[in-house]
Image (cartoon, rainbow, N blue to C red):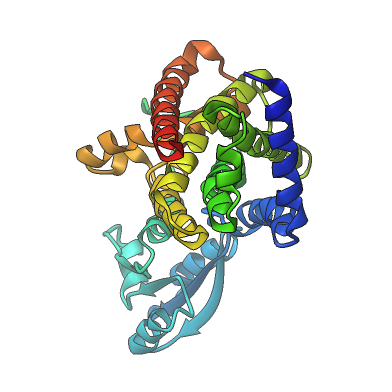
Amino acid sequence: MNRVRIREIVRKEFIQLFRDRKNRPILVVMPFIQLLIFGYVVSTDVRDIKMGILDQSRTRESRLVSQAFEGSPVFRITHRVDDPRELEELLLRRRVDVAVKIAPDFSERVRSGRTAAVQVLADGSMSNLAGVRVAYTLQVLEKLSQDFLRELVPQRVDYGRIDARTRTWFNPNLESRDFFVPGIVAVLIMIISLLFTSMAIIKEKEVGTMEQLIVTPMRPFELILGKTIPYTLISIAQMVAVSLFAVFWFDVPMRGSVLLMFAGVCLFLLSNLGIGLFISTISATQQQAMMTTFFFIVPFFMLSGFIFPIENMPVAVQWLTCLNPLRFMIVIIRGVFLKGVGMEVLWPQYLALVILGAAVFAGAVGRFRKRLD
């Protein structure tokens, strides 16, 4: 292996990469745009629930229901209506997220100690959000029910009870930003390394310089190293920049070892570069290589656990995710950022990346040698 030949290929690749002005925004601007989007826009936190109320009772007790929701920082009563059909229209037009209907006999039932029903209607077009909104609504109504009970039974009643004291580890405030931002580091590395590596070889074929490289004394393995080293360095530089941005701009905690995360990124890049080389050898044009790359990126993203829990997927799909290197990198990077765990916990993910990376890269190199011959 000749270091001088590899160095010259790396230099040539950097010159070609940055000479094209269209590549500069992709390499510099795109990572930070995606990080800002996932940090500020993409959020599963429920903070502002628009509510409509139909009060058919119009009594002190029914007004206490409205006041209970007004006193909550999560709810915002935007509409008070008199017709049930108007309440349904608000839900249909997405003017409100949750609608509460108080029956005419609500106050009478509360004062007599009977069960007083309050109908809660929620927009279920987004099932996850609807479940959280209904849960918050029931919490407010449950607390109000206890207040009514204390009014009806003023004497003190002592009895044994369960005192649940909840403490959330690793993300105490349950901020979705701390969940999404570390994962986007792995996603950006995957996109950049796959996208540019998949076009590294096919670009030489299109411009007619592959034949010139073949007749040089350069060996196939040296050409592969020269082609992949620039994108490895770029991916690592982006990982460092995005990680610093996440820690100092979004205040995402970095509780683990930076060196451990760096080792995981290198193993993750081994798989991505192998897949990119494989795509480059089976494609005839750069457009075809780009389309094939996105054919890999979308399933990798959906089956990584970045947004959708793998445990909720069908068993067959869960086994299929074991072929996805992004799945293991997501676990590593969140474990290092949020949990501060070490190799004693993450060794299965590292072992999986070693096996996948070695198999994929060896297969891509073998196919590349056949095509080079």
Observer-nearest residue: 243 or 49?
Answer: 243
Image quadrant where one finds the N terminus: top right
228 left or right, relative to 22:
left
Give the residue at the far top of this rendering. Answer: 344
Query: Residue placed at 31% from the left, 74% from the top?
Result: 105
Up-down relation of residue 298 to residue 11 (above or below): below
Residue 308 spot, x, y in % from top left: 40, 47
For the question of whether residue 167 can be seen, the reply is no
Query: Residue placed at 35% from the left, 60% from the top?
Result: 127
Residue 210 spot, x, y in % from top left: 56, 46
Residue 82 spot, x, y in % from top left: 42, 88
For the question of whether residue 207 can be seen, the reply is yes
Residue 255 spot, x, y in % from top left: 66, 24
Up-down relation of residue 309 to residue 159 (above or below): below
Give the residue at the far front of this rendering. Answer: 215
Query: Residue placed at 62% from the left, 34% from the top?
Result: 216
